[in-house]
Amino acid sequence: MANAMWDHGYHSRTTYGNGYYRELTPDWLDYAALIQSHQSPRHSDQSFRYLELGSGMGFGLCQMAVAYPEGQFVGVDFNPSHIAQAQALAVNLGLSNVVFLDLDFLDPAASAALRDALPGPAQTYHYVAAHGIYSWVVDEVRDALLRLASQALMPGGIFYCSYNCYPGWLGRSVFQKLLSLEQGRSDPSAERQCFEAVIAKCQHLLGTDANPSPLGVNLPFLKADLANLDLRNIDYLNGEYSNVGWAPVYAADVHQRCSGYRLSYLASASLPDCFEALLAASLREVVLQESNPLLRQTLIDLATNKSFRRDLFVKGCNRLSRVQADSRLAQVRFLPLESPAAHDVPTADAAARSPYVFMTSFGQVIGDPAVYGPIAAVLARSEGSSMEELQASAGESADELPIITSLFLDAGRIAFDRVERGEAALALAQKANRSLLKLIEAGRTYPTVILPLAGTSVEMTLVEVLILQAHRQGLQGKMLASCVNLGLEALGAQLLDASQFPIRSMSEALKRISAIAADCLERRLPMMRRLGAFPADWF
């Protein structure tokens, strides 16, 4: 495990993967704040400044910079390989509103560098984000992270901080401890073998389903956690597990620490988590009886075995009155990402066969079709809908609308309607998406393309990119599938079946590609066109 002076024990031998996280977007953060009656930190003209601490290779920040041209973005990372790739991507996408800084949080000049990163007089930021890294770095760096976030934020600004938490990571802490010991004696070039060896040892120590060991009895979820480790992505696993400062935390400890830096807990960016009414009835009473906020959040995490939190903090509360909050909520607009009817859940429970089934950290939530149906019908309108229009359809259930829309947003069935700001981002986004497709086709692992009218991004796999390019060339049917298969072979990429296992047979590969092509061309491409990802005549 690397422990050079410059990386403070963070795994720096390899780069972290490219990721996009919708919960970091300004519209999402504003909505989470608004349902807690906190005013958006943005100005009336919607311009803003956004800082990401630990921006990795910059993919997510670049996608936001495309979708939100009214914003100015700064990404900071201490790994020069991350910054080099982030800067190259920004150039490839033609961006002028994003800056990446090679900067150590512990550098005494870090705060001044952040103030001077943008043009004009010394600046503070409306939003500061730190995704995941809090639970991966040593204690000294954690303090530096919170200190920088507080210094950089404007009063009323929002700080997003996500992290691995207990109790959900209790089992995986066993695996991580063994891994750190194994890595201490292993050849750094044998990373995959190291993971494989520790997984095998843990599985043996857990016993069998029929005859679990004492460890297996006490850590019943660890076997499933180990089965979910994707050894095809060792870089990600190293980022997740191979840091000297690796330490999941209890939310109460994070909240107390943040308060020392004038950062007050506001809400969760995992929208369903904002509504304790969604807790199972058997758990709700003990939670709602607790008035102490630290104890209350701890009880929720224990009751739901929470393993990951997306916490929002504010540097000074700027609360709206109920009338003001309701008025602003009424103006929020939504666009459909796809038809809710496509989300039927296969289960023996008749009620759960309804499309209004949502998986949350609180468990499965089943919406009453009599309530959710009329709202879903309005949300499905291609021209979009406002919360005010939804209220007319909700009738007596209007008070539940923030919960219902939050469930639909979390499930990826709707997104925010950016209206004229989305239109302003259209030309740049379509140009950037064209560049992204070329980069993906050349073998870069970029996972999403931009939907400018919705201010978010959507997954786009290599197979789908090759399908769209073949379709653009006029290929169809078996010829299209064969061309895509050749493209995958040229890139050394494996085609996976629906269960994510490699496909070995040529006939099965062509069949799988044809099925993906039908879904991509008939369902996903029209949605992406509708939300501005591509011009109507491009494919």
Image (cartoon, rainbow, N blue to C red):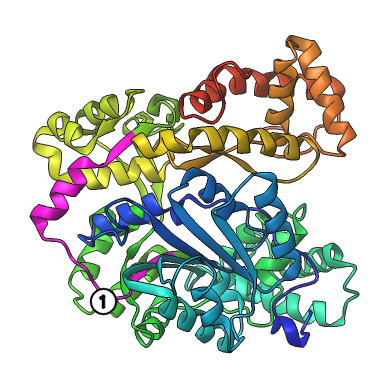
Element under label 1?
A: helix
Q: Is residue 270 visible?
A: no
In the rendering, at what x and y percent does residue 214 appear? 61, 75
Look at label 1 and name its amino acid.
Pro
Residue beneath the point at 81% across and 77% down: 183
Q: In which quarter of the image is the N terminus?
A: bottom right
What's the magenta region? 310-334
The one of 126 and 276 positioned closer to us in this rendering: 126
Horizontal side of residue 64 vs 273, given as left or right: right
* Quarter where residue 405 is shown: top left
Horizontal side of residue 375 vs 455, given as left or right: left
Q: Based on the picture, tell me whether residue 357 belongs to the magenta stretch.
A: no
List the residue tagged with mark 1.
Answer: 293
Q: Is residue 444 visible?
A: yes
Residue beneath the point at 33% across and 44% down: 407
Residue beneath the point at 8% across and 53% down: 323
